[in-house]
Amino acid sequence: MKSRGAILQEGADRWEIVDIEWEDPRQGELLIKMVASGMCHSDDHALTGDLPAPYPFIGGHEGAGIVEQVGPNTPGWEVGDHVVMSFLPGCGRCRWCASGQQNLCDLGEFLLAGCRPDGSFRGTIDGVGAAQMCLISTFSEYTVVDVASAVKVNPDLPLDKACLVGCGVGTGWGSAVNSAEVKPGQTVIVMGCGGIGMNAVQGAAHAGATNVIAVDPVSFKTEVAQTLGATHAFDNMADATEFAQSVTNGQGADSVIVTVGVLEDHHVGEAFAATRKAGTIVVTGLGNAETSKVEVPAFELTLFQKRIQGSLFGASSPSRDIPWMLDMYQAGQLKLDELVTNTYSLDEINQGYDDMKAGKNVRGVIVY
């Protein structure tokens, strides 16, 4: 199958639209005709070099589409099935899947390599094997994926909204509900209100937090956060910390969820300082893979019994939680439409990322 897609070449500072040749799906694989793809910050991390990537590299890891072809001897799938792709595959058999931690599935070993376990590539560009972002490459009109990366969904769902649960929604919502374990009556700070943080706000509100404090220097984002469950908003952590202490008898936030676009060394320290004794700091944002560090006072970590918790896809299990989140959307409990600020064609991908960096988008979506 021939397709147009957005790729990165080594040294590039912009996405390039090229022709891609996709193999026919093998056993256990699907050819997907893409309908929509969210434009997540993680793909920009690959462009800036914060996230290591092999080249050439076909981007996109938050998408939804329709099955165009099913690989041989692949039961349970039919042409015409509607799917949301999970950026984390789930084999269903390894230790992590078996213990309900599907987000840590051993197939994640191949995420940054962008290839099958046997080292082969599903797509080629001018005859050269091309790596897939998170093994799915949703910045392409067509893509070939393993069934471990696909979740069948209700065909009545609008896929240009449903695509968001493949990464951003589950990552943010789960960061609050699963990783921070937010409880009713608590005070929560969400540090950074982009496509991930906005859903951490939703998750904290759903979990019953009394004070959901949104922090972002972009006023547009804090305004949107207040329509999604934030009770208070600030443009800096110092003011947010002071407010959290004022409503907790000086103790501080029960949890701080760090969802900044680019994690810098000082961010976790600021979150740590804003958190009460025995509180939780959830680190969801990404920084440079080689240089980013967590810096906190060890004395306080021990004596105040604080917990620093990493969070991958919000500690969700995709094959279980993607359908749950879409059920909540259809029931009116989870907002997806409101997250989509602007839509773009594939050819407008660089404009979409320029808008993200300029603080104009909660989430931009490519519609094919």
Image (spheres, grey):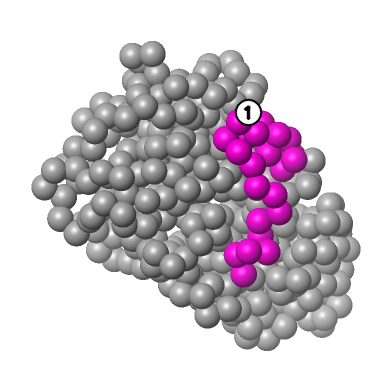
Image quarter of the N terminus: top left
Q: Amino acid at mark 1?
A: Thr
Q: Is residue 308 magenta?
A: no
Image quadrant assignment for residue 288: top right
Q: Is residue 164 left or right of residue 191?
A: left
Please say if 8 is above or below 244. Answer: above
The residue that appears at 22% across and 46% down in the rendered structure is: 70
Q: Is residue 181 left or right of residue 137?
A: right
> What is the secondary structure assignment of the residue under circle 1?
helix
Of the pair 337 and 185, the residue shown nearer to us: 337
Q: Is residue 356 magenta?
A: yes
Image quadrant assignment for residue 208: bottom right
Please say if 170 is above or below 344. Answer: below
Outermost left residue = 73
Image quadrant assignment for residue 184: bottom right
x and y percentages locating residue 77 in the rendered image = 22, 56
x and y percentages locating residue 265 in the rendered image = 69, 42
Residue annotated with mark 1: 48
Of the pair 160 and 136, the residue shown nearer to us: 160
Q: Is residue 108 left or right of residue 237?
A: left
Asked if residue 109 can be seen in this view, the reply is: no
The residue that appears at 39% across and 67% down in the rendered structure is: 154
x and y percentages locating residue 42 in the rendered image = 57, 41
Q: Is residue 150 left or right of residue 259?
A: left
Please say if 134 is above or below 206. Answer: above
The residue that appears at 54% across and 55% down in the rendered structure is: 160
Magenta stretch secondary structure, dominant:
helix
Q: From which residue to which does the magenta span run? A: 335-357
Crowd band around label 1 with a 10 angstrom C-alpha radius: few (<14), some (14–19), many (20+):
some
Of the pair 297 and 95, the residue shown nearer to us: 95
